[in-house]
Image (tube, rainbow, N blue to C red):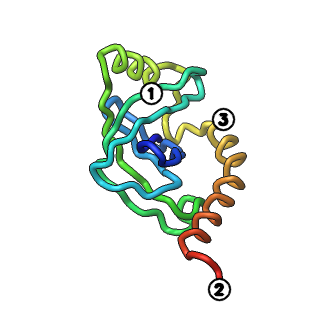
Amino acid sequence: MYQGERIPPAYGIVSDISETGACIHSDRVHYRGQRLQLRIQFAAQAELFETQGRVCWIKPALAGENGMPGGALAGVEFHLPSTTSMSKLRRLLISPDFEFPDSGSRQFEEFLTAMRPFLLKLGSLLDELAQGPSH
């Protein structure tokens, strides 16, 4: 998620997605109304799906929630630039390669297991930064 010049990109895991938006667990807390440039990687698609979005709601994540400390859940409304983008997203979502939540996806579980140590390390680093310099 690109948030503007001189701001490092944020990273997240999409936990729910539709043609109009997504719920994203991000490594940063965003604010309502914030505009984002999104680059989403689908497992079945090598090419990144790019769109703009606006944060509609946020819910700061509690430490250890969903096994990932820090950050927040953000509801992002998509602003698809064209009907071509909408068609591309629709094709991805109805593709037989797209796996629905709670479908027992081994690929997602393997991905999450592989990512967990990195997310935990990132969460610890963010916690340290939030606490400020040690005295």
Give the left or right position of residue 117, taking residue 13 as reference.
right
Q: Nearer the viewer, residue 107 or 116?
A: 116
* Kind of residue indicated by mark 3: Gln
Q: Residue at the location (58% across, 59% down)? A: 68
Residue 126 percent across, percent down from the top left:
58, 64
* Kind of residue indicated by mark 1: Glu
Does the CB distance between marks 2 and 3 fall below 8 Å?
no
Residue 41 percent across, percent down from the top left:
55, 31
Q: Label 3 neighbourhood size at 10 Å, few (<14), some (14-19), many (20+)?
A: few
Work out whether mark 2 precedes mark 1 in sequence or the reverse, and give the earlier one: 1
In the image, which disc is placed on residue 50? 1
In the image, which disc is placed on residue 110? none
Q: Nearest to the eye among marks 1 and 3: give it.
A: 1
Residue matched to label 2:
135
**Mark 2 to mark 1 CA distance (whole Å):** 43 Å
**Mark 1 to mark 3 CA distance (whole Å):** 23 Å
Q: Nearer the viewer, residue 93 or 133?
A: 133
Q: Of all residues shown, which one is farthest toward the bottom?
A: 135
Give the left or right position of residue 74, taking residue 95 as reference.
left
Q: Residue at the location (43% across, 17% down)? A: 91
**Mark 2 to mark 3 CA distance (whole Å):** 44 Å
Does the CB distance between marks 1 and 3 fall below 8 Å?
no
Q: Residue at the location (70% across, 41% down)? A: 110
Work out whether mark 1 precedes mark 3 in sequence or the reverse, and give the earlier one: 1
Work out whether mark 2 precedes mark 3 in sequence or the reverse, and give the earlier one: 3
Above or below 128: residue 47: above
Q: Nearest to the eye among marks 2 and 1: give it.
A: 2
- Badge 2 element: loop
- Badge 1 element: strand
Residue matched to label 3:
107
Give the left or right position of residue 18, taking residue 127 as reference.
left
Q: Residue at the location (72% across, 46% down)? A: 114
